[in-house]
Image (spheres, rainbow, N blue to C red):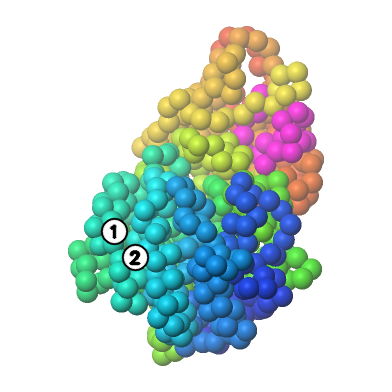
């Protein structure tokens, strides 16, 4: 699929949404597009599945597009879902309710396309809808990016001339501001993780606010735009020349939401890079994803990354969750004559081979066109699924993704790519939360960690022109084996040399999020009691073959 004109992008969105047409409930206030479960009820999952297509439909409508019968479905669903007398009534909001998250696309529709979802309502229906939306101000939410949801709901109500809570918005914006770290970076609440939520939540929502409120709240609008411009200078390093992006952190089933930050920049009218460069990022990214087997046989988005994969899923990924990806289409709200649709998609600008992001405790490398991130210290204290695998590996890649375990018994099932793995009695122990971590002046990422109570490790991972070097000082109270592992890749090429024993691990199928069958090169070391020192050299490949891997 080649993308360039506004019609191309509209067609792409319509192709994604069209298979959902038969999935809506009889009252159109819910959608059932799968059979898997999440931590919340199926009733809420149906609500989520109903609302998330609005991330794409609202901009489509706002930019002058139509998509029957979805236009009619969403008007009917909004009326029935907010009607306490209807069998598909969505119910009241509760504290920390998933509905707080997924009411937001309805708010976006009020902002971008009131002629579709508001003006056709009767006065009674308008009061019914506005009262239900307003009630989100009365419940507690998670102390992170969730604060933006009530802000956007109030913006939606304000836009259609209904009662909104200005004081609540002011207090909530102050909470959001308390998460700011500097240089364009936020934390997503009281946590060390610096993942895609900074881009596709904190900045994405902030830029919508900045655009909508640029006349009514000049100060916050200016702040959100300035911070996004700073963030963009780092975030561009997360994108590969082939259109893929760094595979890192949680919620990767949202896939091409990875580029929605750039869409929000275009929508808000800021240019941290030229329109052509940002269009190039978006075009290549969407084209990359449209070539992947991410849809099922009926054309419905699956849970997974580059292919269907429940192993890597979060507990909060229900059957409709992946449609969060449609945030990437926010730019469709722009006028047909906007420069974005007239400009040529340009390649990435010249970028440094190494780029340090101190706020994210991350060193980015660009070698042979793709992205590698060397990290330490990123840890989600609330422990989403596979936290260690999504945050605590030594390196993450846009080309090779990362692997998650089927089991920690046996290297093939643990699939511990880019990790130093200790094996005792057949069980694999890896780096999880670090005791200390920091980045040295030469870009070395230093960390101190304990895979288990009997072993303590001090690791130094130093970027090089061709890859990186890992030096580990290991203090062990018992004899065991250690395996320093490279990326998991789809082929079995590559060489290993050094004083350790070179081995190859054929991982269990579907452990890697990019390739469903992978091999991992590793150096095997015999760890004695007391102090041990090992060093492993990783060289990245010049093509899509596996990294060259050495150790001693």
Give whichever of 259, 172 is nearer the camera.
172
- The spot of residue 292 in percent (x, y) is 69, 65
Q: Residues within 10 Å of mark 1 (few under 14, many from 20)?
A: many
* Closer to us: 236 or 169: 169
CB contact under 8 Å: marks 2 and 1: yes
What's the CA distance linking mark 2 and mark 1? 7 Å
Residue 371 visible in the displayed image: no
Residue for badge 2:
154
Asked if the magenta segment contains residue 415, the reply would be yes
Look at mark 1 in the image and give the residue it sits on. 169
Q: Main secondary structure of the magenta part?
A: loop
Compared with 332, 106 (above or below) is above
On-image quarter of the N terminus: bottom right
Q: In this orientation, which residue lies closer to the viewer: 109 or 278?
A: 109
For this view, does 95 lie left or right of residue 287? left
User: Which residue appears farthest toward the front when viewing the image?
Assistant: 85
| Residue at 52%, 74% in the rendered image | 79
Residue 472, placed above or below residue 85: above
Which region shows up in magenta? 404-422
Secondary element at image label 2: helix
In the rendered structure, the answer to whether residue 127 lies left or right of residue 536 reads: left
Residue 103: x %, y % from top left = 47, 63
Q: Position of residue 412 (x, y in %)?
A: 77, 36
Residue depicted at x 70% and y 68%:
300
* Residue 290 sits inside the magenta stretch: no
Residue 152 sits in quarter: bottom left
- Which circle's residue, 2 or 1, is located before the other in the chain? 2
């Amino acid at each position: 699929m080649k993308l360039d004109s506004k019609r191309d992008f509209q067609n792409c969105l319509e192709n994604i949404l069209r298979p959902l047409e038969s999935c809506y409930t009889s009252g159109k206030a819910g959608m059932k597009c799968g059979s898997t479960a999440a931590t919340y009820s199926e009733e809420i999952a149906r609500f989520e599945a109903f609302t998330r297509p609005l991330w794409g439909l609202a901009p489509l409508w706002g930019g002058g597009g139509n998509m029957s019968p979805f236009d009619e479905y969403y008007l009917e669903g909004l009326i029935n879902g907010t009607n306490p007398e209807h069998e598909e009534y969505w119910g009241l909001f509760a504290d920390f309710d998933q509905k707080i998250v997924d009411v937001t696309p309805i708010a976006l529709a009020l902002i971008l396309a009131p002629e579709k979802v508001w003006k056709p309502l009767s006065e009674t229906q308008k009061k019914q809808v506005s009262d239900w939306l307003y009630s989100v101000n009365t419940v507690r939410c998670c102390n992170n990016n969730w604060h933006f949801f009530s802000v956007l709901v109030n913006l939606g109500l304000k836009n259609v001339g209904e009662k909104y809570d200005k004081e609540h918005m002011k207090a909530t914006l102050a909470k959001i501001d308390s998460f700011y770290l500097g240089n364009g970076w936020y934390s997503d609440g009281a946590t060390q993780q610096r993942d895609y939520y900074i881009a596709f939540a904190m900045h994405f929502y902030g830029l919508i606010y900045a655009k909508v409120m640029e006349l009514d709240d000049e100060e916050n609008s200016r702040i959100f735009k300035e911070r996004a411009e700073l963030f963009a200078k780092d975030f561009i390093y997360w994108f590969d020349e082939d259109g893929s992006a760094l595979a890192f952190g949680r919620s990767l089933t949202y896939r091409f939401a990875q580029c929605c930050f750039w869409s929000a920049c275009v929508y808000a009218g800021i240019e941290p890079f030229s329109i052509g460069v940002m269009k190039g990022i978006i075009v290549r990214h969407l084209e990359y994803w449209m070539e992947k087997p991410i849809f099922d046989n009926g054309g419905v988005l699956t849970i997974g990354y580059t292919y269907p994969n429940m192993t890597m899923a979060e507990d909060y990924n229900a059957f409709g969750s992946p449609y969060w990806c449609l945030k990437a289409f926010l730019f469709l709200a722009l006028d047909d004559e906007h420069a974005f649709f007239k400009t040529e998609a340009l390649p990435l600008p010249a970028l440094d081979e190494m780029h340090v992001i101190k706020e994210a405790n991350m060193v980015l490398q660009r070698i042979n066109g793709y992205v590698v991130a060397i990290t330490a210290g990123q840890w989600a204290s609330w422990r989403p699924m596979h936290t260690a695998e999504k945050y605590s590996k030594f390196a993450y890649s846009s080309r090779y993704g990362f692997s998650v375990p089927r089991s920690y018994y046996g290297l093939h099932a643990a699939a511990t790519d880019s990790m130093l793995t200790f094996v005792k009695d057949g069980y694999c122990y890896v780096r999880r939360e670090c005791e200390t971590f920091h980045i040295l002046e030469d870009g070395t990422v230093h960390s101190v960690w304990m895979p288990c109570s009997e072993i303590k490790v001090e690791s130094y991972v130093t970027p090089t022109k061709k890859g990186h070097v890992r030096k580990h000082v290991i203090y062990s109270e018992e004899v065991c084996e250690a395996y320093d592992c490279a990326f998991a890749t789809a082929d079995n090429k590559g060489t290993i040399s050094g004083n350790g024993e070179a081995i190859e691990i054929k991982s269990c199928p579907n452990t890697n999020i990019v390739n469903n069958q992978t091999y991992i090169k590793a150096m095997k070391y015999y760890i004695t009691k007391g102090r041990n020192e090992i060093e492993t050299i990783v060289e990245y490949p010049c093509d899509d073959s596996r990294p060259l891997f050495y150790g001693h």
